[in-house]
Image (cartoon, rainbow, N blue to C red):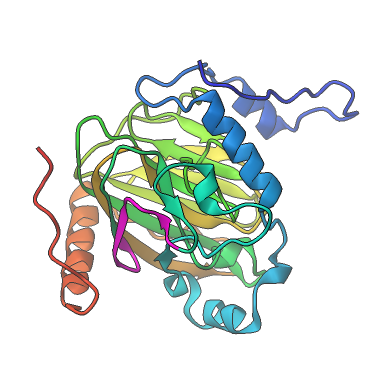
Amino acid sequence: MPFSLRRNREGQGALPTYQEAVTDRQRSYDTSPLNNASRDNFVLAANFRQFFPPVLRPTTIQRHEWQRLMQHGITALQFQHPPKYSGQSRLKDFGPRFDDGQGPGNILLKGPTNFTFTQNIDSCLQTDLPLPSSTMDNFEADSFQVTIMNKTPETVVAVGLASKPYPPFRLPGWDPESIGYHSDDGRKYHNDPDGGKDYGPAYTQGDVITVQYTRAAGSVQFFKNGQPLGPAVYQLNVPLYPTVGADGPCQVSVRWLPSQQATYANVTLPQSHEESLAAASTHQQALSQDSSSIREPPPPYQ
């Protein structure tokens, strides 16, 4: 059974909000059907956060990064391997197939929004910059789509948001200041290293998962093939970075949807599964035209 530390509200002097109470009524599980991290993995993640605490305020964003976000919105974001960490420990000390500056050794970046997980090991990638709406008042909402291009039947994919630095050997949702929607059980994981809570259907190769963040409520909502699954969490008000993880071989492609300026209208989302897949196909073709950084995708996993 996975190891975790449960929060204790006693003695905190405040009752949970209505939205927290609604969330807490959803069924919670001690284990997940396929992927359960070990106690050692949990302890390593706690040590990682101690050495490299997450940034919970937007004041650390550099001026040139701020300008990129102002000018381009979410399209300024790029997925990248973790930067070189310095301090009392090195990244490779936290698990196999990790090293300074390169991040997960089993992830092949084929472009800023296209990458492949190649080995059976928990790992994730994050973007270089946070969602504009999680750091800047003049952006109200951001959304992005993750297409599961191919994967093995046993691989668990996790799509979501997380603070940064985030342990690159963990899936989004397992650690504080993160939320993840996992493919094997369709459950949501929010600061939950155990079995998650009921949320939506499972997903697999060919599916398109959309993540939507709204600044006003600090809310995160997921869509599967254009169908809304409802709010997954509220009051997540820290700089959030798109985060995609997997525990085995798979290939994913990410598509940014236009950032919503400071209005309170809903973000436009694809109206159908076919429209989502068509958009993802167009995005994949555009990526393949850049032969300097993009290689042909591998054949589908058997």
Q: Which residues are magenta?
A: 102-114
**Which residue is more in the foreground, 77 or 123?**
123
Query: As drawn, is 7 to the left or to the right of 278?
Result: right
| Near-viewer residue (232 or 241) | 241
Note whether 74 is above or below 88 in the view shown: below
Q: Is residue 111 magenta?
A: yes
* Residue drawn where x is 48% and y is 64% of the image: 101
Can residue 272 be seen? Answer: no
Q: Main secondary structure of the magenta part?
A: strand
Residue 109, percent from left and from top: 31, 63
Q: Is residue 281 above or below residue 53?
A: below
Q: How many marks?
A: 0
| Rendered location of residue 298, percent (x, y) | 12, 55
- 176 on left or right of 271: right
Query: In the rendering, at what x and y percent does residue 87 appear?
Result: 67, 58
Q: Quadrant of the C terminus?
A: top left
Seen at 23% across and 67% down, the residue is 283
* Front position in the image: 218 or 163: 163
Residue 257 horizontal/vertical position (percent): 39, 65
Residue 213 visible in this rendered orientation of the protein: yes
- Residue drawn at x 21%, y 79% is 292
Whether residue 59 is in magenta: the answer is no
Q: Quadrant of residue 277?
A: bottom left
Q: Residue at the location (68% across, 31% down)? A: 20
